[in-house]
Image (tube, coloured by chain):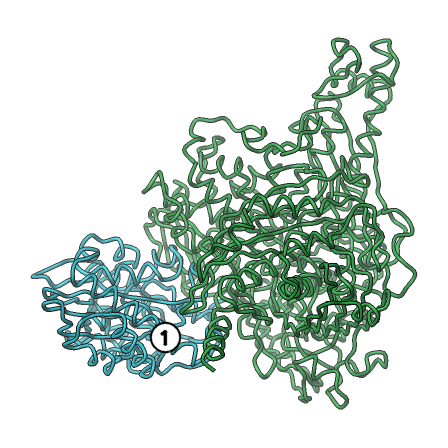
Amino acid sequence: MGRRNEQAVMITITVNERRHMLAVPPEATLKQVIREDLGLTGTKSGCDVGDCGACSVLMNGKAVNSCLVLAATCDGAEIKTIEGVADGNDLHPLQKSFIKHGALQCGFCTPGMIISSLELIEKNPKPEPAEIKKALGGNLCRCGTYPRVMEAVGNWQKFEGVELDTDPGEHDERDQERDHSVVGKGVTRYDGPDKVTGREQYTADLKLPDMVHGKLLGSTIAHGLIKSIDTSAAEALPGVLAVITAKDVPEIKYGVSPARYDEHILAVDRVRYVGDEVAAVVAEDETTAEEAVKLIKVEYEELPAVFDPREAIKDGAPQIHPEEEKYANNINTRVEWHFGDVDQGFDEAEVIVEDTFIGNRPFQSPIEPHAAVARWEHHAGKLTIWSSSMAPHYLRHMLNRVFDIPQGDIRTISPCVGGGFGVKAEATPLDLCAVVFARLTGRPVMMKYSREEMVHHFRGRHKQYIDMKLGLKKDGSIAACQSHILLDGGAYTSYGIVTAYYAGSMVPTLYNIPNYKYDGFRMYTNLPASGAMRGHGVPQPRYAFETLMDMAAEKLGLDPFDVRLKNAMQPDTLTCNDLDISSCEFTATLEQAREFTEWDAKRKSLPEGKGIGVGCGGFVSGAGYPIYRSKFPHSNALIRLSEDGMAASLHIAAAEIGQGCNTILPQIAAEELGIPYHRIWLVESDSVLAPTDLGSYSSRVTLMAGNAVRMAAAEVKSQLLKMAGEMLGCDVHGLEARDGKIFVSQHPEVEIAWDEVARKVFSRGGPVTGTGHYSPPPGLGGNYKGAAVGTSPAYSFSTAVCEVTVDLETGYVDVDRFYDFSDSGTVINPVTFHGQVEGGIIMGLGETLMEDTLVRPDGSLVNPDLHGYLVPTIAESPHIISKAVESYEPRGPFGAKEIGEGCLPPILGAIGNAIYDACGVRVTELPITPEKILAGLKRQKEEKRG
Amino acid sequence: MSFGRFNYHQPSTTAEACALGLEYGRKSAYLAGGTELLVDLRSGRKSVCHVISLGGLDELKHITREEDVLRIGALVPLSEIAESAEVKSHFPALSDAIETMAGRQIRNLGTMGGNFCCGVPCSDTPPISCAADAEVVLTGTDGSRTVAAREFVLAPRVTVLNPGEILTEIRFPKQPTGAGASFQRFSLRRGSALAVASVAAWVRMEDRIIAEARIYLGSVGPVPLSATKAADLLAGKNPGDELFAEAGAQAAAEAQPISDLRGSEQYRRDVVQVLTARALTQACERAEGKC
């Protein structure tokens, strides 16, 4: 294990029925021994303090957190890890059930989920839902697979003796029938088997020969000047290879957006938040690196700090980036938009409602903390980096910029990513310092964030201070909307420019707003930088808007559905801010939701304490423009056939972060090629093996990578059809490829096997390949400053209805049911589609009701963890009914659009409006905690009395 | 973050464990389930040179009932206690209290001894034990002593344990005829989360009248707090919503909560009021054999 310790404890443990005699250091945990000594990396490391359950193993038949067990105490223990659950090649029925129910996404929590479920079913083969909830309450899943896990565990026995295949389950067909063989079918996830067996590798699971470990030192103060850094004691510690500070790394600023590169790899002269990276150590092992970091002495001159954007904007406030005049008054980004004439609009309004809404600071909290491994190659100037990145292309771009290495000399590999939701979309000091160390030592370097470090690095949601005003005419049509928003950006820009624009640009995409004004100020504060989080910038303004819609409807005596229907966006519309809405079935989502939920009846009949509410939202299907100026196609794909024609390999660089692109892109390829899904191999996320893709952000992959894949497949198919025409002696134009055959459309009996044709093509001309690429339509967006943000080839639309029960004595809210009706174009895979919706609802529920990253008066974080920062567990997971309301998007592959992000913004408003319906309390400050509701109920009582 | 470095000891008898604890004193810590200690070591809240594992002390892993006294060994995992038929039939409120705690994996590791000895205000088993008038047995190099559960914790993370002393057993006395108890807890989510407040109530009914009552509050004071005035207010009265609301208000006044990320002082009092009424309702129902 590489750790130094005089004492070792001899233990004999049986792991997956194999006995091991080991000498372990006293402080080694069972998790470390399993992962590092035995190499069983299916047991994951998420939090190290028993909060997440990812490291669960069975010890003597009981599920335990292996991070909370000292290996020394395990002498004689029988351990079962995820690798020991299957019987050789035959998966346990529970594992098959997880795959078939789509009960996994990023897969990072899956081994722990299965282990905990195993303890349950071995004792109780037919568990009730309540028993499953109790057994799995200690296993957090941030993708929100809980509803499917419930199904998978409840029905595991159905998979006893069943052979695992890739076919869809009986209910996993799309609602609307279209004539496809693979698209629209709920085929099982490509990565399912690897994720249920622990075989899937994430970055922190890698172990390269001779690998060393790096660790970062963060600032302990929120704002100050660095007077001196003494690294001598750290350097003197045996096992330490190097200690670096700003003077040892390239003197260049980096970030996300070229307009605001404002971060240094390691702080130069000034620190701007608690956690700002100051120095880093590389050592033979992780423990030594951690110890060395503690020996670095930094002397600061503390400066006044500011933690509230409302204060930061005032004259005389501490200046966080005084070196740049453009950031005067701590204004990082300023947006001034005015479309139409709001004054005139408000004049025409029958009712005007306005309020101040204060958002919260949700953190993505993926269960996998970031990790990076860098290796300096022996050829001159080449680098390989493995990183838990959602956007490896941007990582490569930034490495190219910072280290001046040509992009072609950098190989980025994204192993499986254990959840992203926006937090892993940019280069981090881990990536950058790992490269510095790899160059310095000539050895592969692993760097990981602890959970606490990850939260300090943050890039979570911007807390927004929103003043919003909405005017409706008598008939319910919107007359005008105006918002003034301060966004708390923290100390650096990250994706924040985009956030500031999105907070305004997406408001007019859902309803027709003739007059709209938005003033946005993204502010610097001495807090960790905010960044892009699922639904980027949109959920909090959407919460404000959907709340005001209900308030206005109430004043007008209209039903919340009626006002939404009145203003609902229609297809082929140019919004007031020049966004080009193509397909749109928003009205249908509203109508179907209203009918299905029996809204009109329930709205009137629910007892006190129970309520029903609606909220709407949507998102872009990929950004119209990349983050930095580039003429590269946004997505690219390469397909190569095997020589025998039985398989096609699809080479793509979009990152699988749980959203399911590694399943739906092969589906698109298979459909277009005309072969079954199971004949596709996937070669992914390696910049040497696959052409560039901008990454898994802004919900872009289905549409953009999907189009590129389809184009590549079409190129291969055309070669095959041409050859088949020759072989069958008929005109190529009348031929069709499907289900592994090529046949004459009009005479399907005239057919030839697909692989036979492919062999012939190969025999004649060598490798059979096709390439595809996609760029959004040129010229999207208007001619005003910031018009690019919000542009997209297509938009999703969603109506969510929720039913809640409010405990009128404590204010606690149980979300009983959620209904989601989403228009995301053609559904490629119903299982991953509904999985995304469910996950969005559960994540949205968390940020509406419980999540908030809290700050102490000195700027340090109160809850950089998973016990003070609460995310939903399986116990809060509501009953969810998700329905696809399909449009056909002409710009999407087979008519598809996005789903992963648009499903979240409606949730906040739906819950808030349902709470109001249940108890008459409106909470305008997120999260809506029981305490705030109870305070509202008390005020209500006082008002009634007084 | 990794733990500091320490030496590891695994005694096989209680006497040996006590001797080691006495020898290393404050530089050492006893390891039971590890769910608190390892978190403290990792966070740096605690740092020790010696970890003394109690895992080898098989004599502390029993649940027995002798002459109606329920004896729970300090090292029995919480999940085992909650599922024990003895506990469920003899004192179901303890099962309830444990079921509200943490996740399954923690309940499989954590012990009741540990839950007491960590002495944190949000521990869930002490309030219900205090309400039941339980005792804890403390064993040291000089022999054993018995202390009332309510006297065990002195201040946050401070207990009556002397160096080299180990909590070996928790004893629940024979429950008199007409006794019933309830544990009510409120947290910010249903799954695994620390309590905002908890209330344990114990009553003894005679002829449908509350003859005797005890109320203990958790997470709203430095130690499990006895809401003595609230309990006194019940004696000799007929159970009923109005009475319980009054007792709840009194208990809320007796609570000594702090404001933190889980709730403000005022909110915690509000919750105590509600939980007290709910706990009394259930305790009386149990006393009358209604559930």
Residue A201 can be seen, yes or no: no
Nearer to me, A319 or B38? A319
* Residue A808 locus on image (x, y percent): 42, 67
* Residue A773 locus on image (x, y percent): 84, 41
- Which chain comes out cyan in the rendered image? B
Q: Residue at x 75, y 18 (%)?
A: A754
Q: Is residue A207 above or below residue A644?
A: below
Which color has been applied to chain A in this rendered view? Answer: green
Q: Which residue is mark 1?
A: B219
Q: Characterize the local packing of mark 1: few (<14), some (14-19) or many (20 or more) Cα atoms within 10 angstroms.
A: many
Task: Please tell me whether mark 1 sits on a helix, a strand or a loop.
Answer: loop
Nearer to me, A124 or A475? A475
Choose top left, top right, bottom left or bottom right for residue A810: bottom left
Residue A28 can be seen, yes or no: yes
Q: Is residue A238 above or below residue A757?
A: below
Nearer to me, A721 or B285? B285
The amino acid type found where label 1 is placed reads Ser
* Residue A196 locus on image (x, y percent): 52, 41
Q: Residue at x 84, y 60 (%)?
A: A577
